Image (tube, helix red, strand yellow):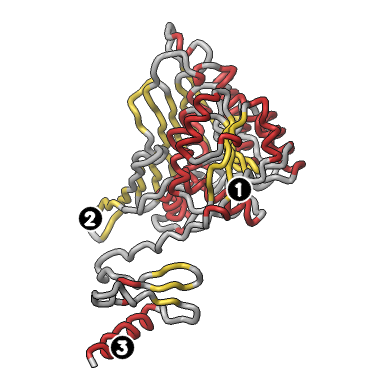
Amino acid sequence: MAQDQDGATRRGLLRATGLTAAGVAIGAAGAPGYPPPSPIDAGGVQDGRVRFPEWRGDAEPPSAPTPNPLPPGERVGYAIIGLGRISLEETLPAFAESRMSRPVALVSGSPEKARTVARRYGIAEGSIYSYEELERLRENREVQAVYIGLPNAMHREYVVRVAGIGKHVLCEKPMATSPEEAAEMVTSCARANVRLMIAYRCQYEPYNRAAIEIVRRGELGKLRFIEATNVQSSGPAPQWRFSRRLAGGGALPDIGLYCLNAARYVTGEEPDQLFASSYSPPGDPRWAEIEESVSFGLRFPSGVVANCLCGYDAFNDKTLRLHFERGTVEMPDAFSYEGQQMYVSRREGQIAVREQRRIPHKNQFALELDHFSECVRANRQPHTPGEEGAHDQALMAAIYRSAAEGRPIQAPKPPGPTRGPAPSSES
């Protein structure tokens, strides 16, 4: 009788949580010799996914769904071009947290480094290529997409070459070193019928997406002003970032781009006027070819004004502030690889309150990889396609022009939409 009552209790819980739908397999038998697990602990299979009833009380936030990765053989296979810091410290480790993506090939100018990395990630030695052998990726059926983590000036050549062999391309930002290069990259990929996405990781990061939603919902009224700061302390020369030939510029394309892109994706608008000023401290060989800092302002059609600051010789600060009619959103480390936070200030009754909103951390590199993999599998335009990067290149060219001429100028307009569908909640 106790056993029947226990079984009835489990069935009742499962019905209450929706886990008794057709096709659900309930794993409640347990290990021999031990009491069977409760339905809350055992969960069940629904639509090919293991699901658990909520185990927390109403006072706690609900648990996140269980991870639902694709089997390894069904994931989109990536070739990684360039084994510098961004690839080795961020992108390759992010595959461990991805649901739909896996590394299957490497392209590098260092055979020794490539063999070392391949062993760590289970990549076959036969899937290691030199830069000269890039076109051989055409024959590698495991490779469906390519990630380009090279210095800025190399992006155009390698995007065009990858498009030429029919592989989809995820290219690091900034997209290129000029609007002309960016336009060629978009055209080459369109002609080859391959997808091109620019790795604007912040557009996939949960706190930045939450900020967008606050603006779109009008939670704090109309957005009025944006403050975006991205400064850091740079080390000694030589570095490729200090070379105009390799970087195409200084602080603006490297870290100021985050401020520019954030102002665009937060407002959902394109600026119609901009004004900029740049500076390089004299006598420091690091700034002989590039600017050390740029400050620039953007005015948007809705009346929003964005003040942006980027620099290579100041203590690290990557803060985004949004000022609304009825409140303020402050996001320390908005543009960092991790550590994002969000504070919302507004009036409640007779007092002003400042609350911290906590959002579960997700690896933004894994999120952008999986979004692109979703788009490759579905043959869909990514959220940050080549057009998004190309318009930032046009705006940065205008910022440089304003700084050189010392006057406000009209901002260029994109020829069409620059973003695809928003990423899903899981990517």
Looking at the image, is 349 positioned above or below residue 103? below
Can residue 140 be seen here? yes
**Residue under numbered circle 3:** 8
**Most foreground residue, 369 or 101:** 101
Looking at the image, is 346 positioned above or below residue 44? above
Q: Please name the amino acid that badge 3 sits on.
A: Ala
Which quadrant of the view contains residue 409? top right
Q: Residues within 10 Å of mark 3 (few under 14, many from 20)?
A: few
Q: Position of residue 344 (x, y in %)?
A: 32, 51
**Most foreground residue, 361 or 230:** 361
Front label number (1 vs 2):
1
Which numbered circle lies on residue 351?
A: 2
Give the CA distance from mark 1 to mark 2.
40 Å
Q: Please name the amino acid that badge 1 sits on.
A: Arg
> Is residue 245 found left or right of 20 in the rendered image?
right
User: Which residue is pictured at 42% across the width and 59% down the height?
Assistant: 67
Q: Mark 3: which secondary structure?
A: helix
Give the CA distance from mark 2 to mark 3.
51 Å
User: Which residue is pictured at 38% across the width and 26% down the height?
Assistant: 232
N-term-proximal mark, 2 vs 3: 3
User: Which residue is pictured at 63% across the width and 40% down the height?
Assistant: 169
Q: Please name the amino acid that badge 2 sits on.
A: Ile
Q: Position of residue 192 (x, y in %)?
A: 75, 42
**Residue under numbered circle 1:** 419
N-term-proximal mark, 1 vs 2: 2
Q: Position of residue 295 (x, y in %)?
A: 46, 27
Can residue 296 be seen here? no
Looking at the image, is 193 positioned above or below residue 68? above
Quadrant, the N terminus: bottom left
Tell me whether the residue at label 2 lies in contact with that at label 3, contact meaning CB atoms closer than 8 angstroms.
no
